[in-house]
Amino acid sequence: MKKILLFLCAATFFSTFSQTEDAWLYLKDKPNATTVLQNPIDILSEKALQRRTKLGISLDEKDVPIHLDYYNQLKNEGNIVVLGKSKWLNAIHIQGTVSQINGLLPNFPFIESIEFANKSLNTNGEKKEKKVPINHHDKFLKTLTDFNYGSAENQIKMLKGDFLHQQGLTGSGQIIAVVDAGFPNVNTLDAFQRIRENNQILGGYNFADRSENFYTRDSHGTHVLSTIAAYKEGEFVGTAPDAKFYLFITEIAETETVLEETLWVEAAERADSLGVDVINTSLGYTTYDNPNHSHTYADMDGKTTFISRGAEIAVSRGILVVNSAGNSGDDAWKYIAAPADAPSVITVGAVNSSGNIASFSSFGPTADNRVKPEIVGQGVSATIINYSTGGISTSSGTSFSSPIMAGLIACLNQNEGFTLKSETSSTNFNTYLKQALYQSADKFENPENQYGYGLPNLENALNSYIGAVGSLNDNFLSDLQIYPNPVENIFTISSKTQSPNNYKIKIYSVLGKMVFEKNILQFQSIDISALSSGLYFIKIFTGKQSKTIKLLKN
């Protein structure tokens, strides 16, 4: 009997260490980092650099690609397969047997550490409770009908998104990356003709197949994109119809593997390098086909999973990352998924058309007790464009509440009329935008585990956001005022403490476009009868001092 037991133990040990495993190799350094950072245009587009400048975000070593010589040495190693890489995490995703992977450390001194997807194989690894695998063929919770009810009015108006559109905030100048499972027929459907003809699709990539063809694979991405970008005259309008888009496939819908986490981070890095402003990702990861790779609720702390660490870096680069909370509210695993647990990601749950929480919408808080999701949008019978018929349909899931919100967040982020002072470069516009968004929600004072802060009011969020950003310059000309406000046609500038001097005023629309400019010798009345009604922002300059004031013209 003892011999049999010894044989079984040996057989189990051999099986464990001979089967193929996934692992990330973390590298020690980037030897050429200093040289690369001296030529940033070689690693980031002009648009990306402009975004960094606007937000006061400096380049650092995370922006430097993985050292090519290190990568090639591992690529040419015959005992392993290289599947992906991340410059942000300075890591390379590989497959091989446990013994082959562990054998890399003494042979490649530039490897800092190894992290196995199977956590029990890591140093001090503990086997954690596994969850029952879900049916990955239905992981997007589709309840699709071909009901032509006419418009996406409710899902926009319940958030006061129509107010943003009425102000001309329709996503113009914003670049949104949609990271998803596939985009079939986006290149042919009439509902996407407007963004095709206006050259709003800037490109994309199929990371799942390492292919330039991104109009393929699962239709989930097409449906998600439609809530933001589609347009049918008099029938359907997406939440950011004038934005531009990159379309990235990272999800392999027919399986669930940890490789998809790496592919997502690769896509986020590509989005950053191209100057993307907003990422929407209606994806989430908890359970894998290999149960040894699955996450537990304890891993939903925003810093454990590879994808959540990558998402957090994406936000640090100045990108607004919006992620669906997940559709597990009715399951044994009821919690949010990664990367929705990342602290700086805007996580979106789902409600019905009346604002009541959807039972399937995943719960927070995170494992470290943070509010997640932060906000909610319509995800029950959300209006989409059906990828096969091109008609208006409905579908349910946080997969749709997230992009509905991402489009409106891009509209909220559209204003270019203000810049932060150099003294405040450690903060950025995105901090104020998210704060305004969350505080506008109907349960901000009393958040709930499934509802978060609740349903945002984008009209209130816009006013709070611009007020917060504009107030950054209020140290100057502190007593300066304009009246009346609101104004019909003429307003007057006055100050108790500032004596008449040479001043310049510039008036910007909410789109950030300068619509009026004038040099004045003293504080005096200004006629703006030529401007249409709406919200404007006045910047008043004297020397190096300035002040921004919000003005409403009736």
Image: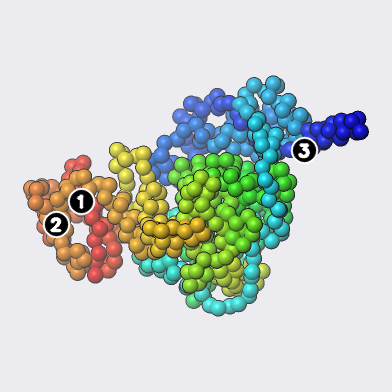
Question: Which amino acid type is shown beneath numbered disc 2?
Answer: Ile
Q: Is residue 432 left or right of residue 481?
A: right
Mark 2 and mark 1 in contact? Answer it, CB < 8 Å: yes
Task: Please tell me which residue lies in front, 315 or 438.
Answer: 438
How far across and down, in percent of the image, does residue 384 sit?
57, 68
How far across and down, in percent of the image, does residue 319 sit?
47, 47
Q: Is residue 358 left or right of residue 464?
A: right
- Where does label 2 land, which residue? 493
Give the SS element for disc 3. strand
Q: Quadrant of the C terminus?
A: bottom left
Q: Residues within 10 Å of mark 3 (few under 14, many from 20)?
A: some
Distance CA(mark 3)–CA(mark 1): 65 Å
Task: Please tell me which residue lies in front, 464 or 384.
Answer: 464
Q: Quadrant of the N terminus?
A: top right
Distance CA(mark 2)–CA(mark 1): 10 Å
Q: Is residue 255 visible?
A: yes
Distance CA(mark 2)–CA(mark 3): 73 Å
Q: Residue at x 44, y 63 (%)?
A: 455
Question: Which amino acid type is shown beneath numbered disc 1?
Answer: Ile
How far across and down, in percent of the image, does residue 297 sit?
60, 48
Question: Where residue 540 is drawn, which disc sits there?
Answer: 1
How far across and down, in percent of the image, does residue 265 sit?
58, 44
Give the SS element for disc 1. strand
- Location of residue 140 with respect to 421 vertically, above or below: below
Q: Residue at x 27, y 47 (%)?
A: 472
- Where does label 3 land, which residue? 20
